Amino acid sequence: MDETYTLWLCPPADSPVHARLAATIDKYAALLGGPRFEPHLTLYSSIKAGSDAEVLNRVATYVAGLQRHFGDGLMRIPVRIRDVGVGTTFYQCVLLNEDGNSLLATANSLASMYWDDKRSRPFVPHVSLVYGNQTPEERDALREQLAAELGDDCPSLSYASAEIRVMTFSPTAPWRNVGSVDIATGAITTAAGA
């Protein structure tokens, strides 16, 4: 039976941006009783594969396609944060809006073509801060609170991801890190315990 995977662009684990985003996510998860998760931007989701090894190899092939498209100089994919916003779904409750940079949009479009995705769904690049089913009024209040905490500092939460992290996805189970593929080299790293 195939498992569902998703591709994340994460800030470097040892960076100040990762520390600040993780602290914010953890704080609001504790306050609201919501789930904790790693800071990330979802590049692409809903990939079906029969095994972790299969999906990692397919992601490495996709990364080789990115290199061909953008040229061998592609080392990282930038995530440029604009401001705090809200969404309308559980996974897009309160978030940081990404400025919609063209490299990121093209990488998503190429993923859609690579996985032959016929679904029509908009790409809304963002970094979630809160997952939850809050009402629109509660979401707006949380957005205002987070915007006040972060102030004009949102752009400083921008980062460039050197790898594409591959995660399992299930609405009934926690995220599981399968491994990652280096954007510059296509090298696969399997997650510990995967």
Image (cartoon, helix red, strand yellow):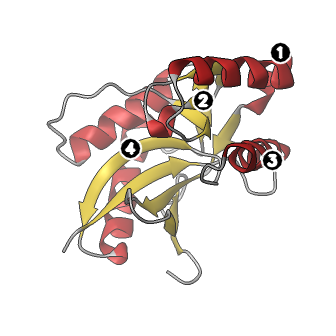
- Tell me which label, 4 or 2, sits earlier in the chain: 4
In the rendered image, the quadrant that contains the N terminus is bottom left
Q: Amino acid at mark 2?
A: Val
Q: Give the structural element (helix, strand or loop) at label 2.
A: strand
Report how far apart the C-alphas of labels 3 and 4 lie in the structure: 25 Å
Residue 44 - label:
4
- Tell me which label, 2 or 1, sits earlier in the chain: 2
Report how far apart the C-alphas of labels 3 and 1 lie in the structure: 18 Å
Query: Which residue is at 66% across, 40% downward?
Result: 160
Marks 4 and 1: which is nearer the front?
Answer: 1
Marks 3 and 4: which is nearer the front?
Answer: 3
Residue 23 - label:
3
| Residue at the disc numbered 2 | 94
- Tell me which label, 3 or 4, sits earlier in the chain: 3
- Tell me which label, 3 or 1, sits earlier in the chain: 3
Q: Is residue 18 visible?
A: yes
Marks 3 and 1: which is nearer the front?
Answer: 3
Report how far apart the C-alphas of labels 4 and 2 lie in the structure: 19 Å
Badge 3 crowding class, 10 Å Cα cut-off, few under 14, some 14 to 19, many 20 or more, is some
| Residue at the disc numbered 1 | 152
Q: Give the structural element (helix, strand or loop) at label 1.
A: helix
Q: Amino acid at mark 4?
A: Tyr
Q: Is residue 83 visible?
A: no
Q: For this rendering, which residue is in front, 73 or 80?
A: 80
Q: Give the structural element (helix, strand or loop) at label 4.
A: strand
- Tell me which label, 4 or 1, sits earlier in the chain: 4
Report how far apart the C-alphas of labels 2 and 3 lie in the structure: 15 Å
Marks 2 and 1: which is nearer the front?
Answer: 2
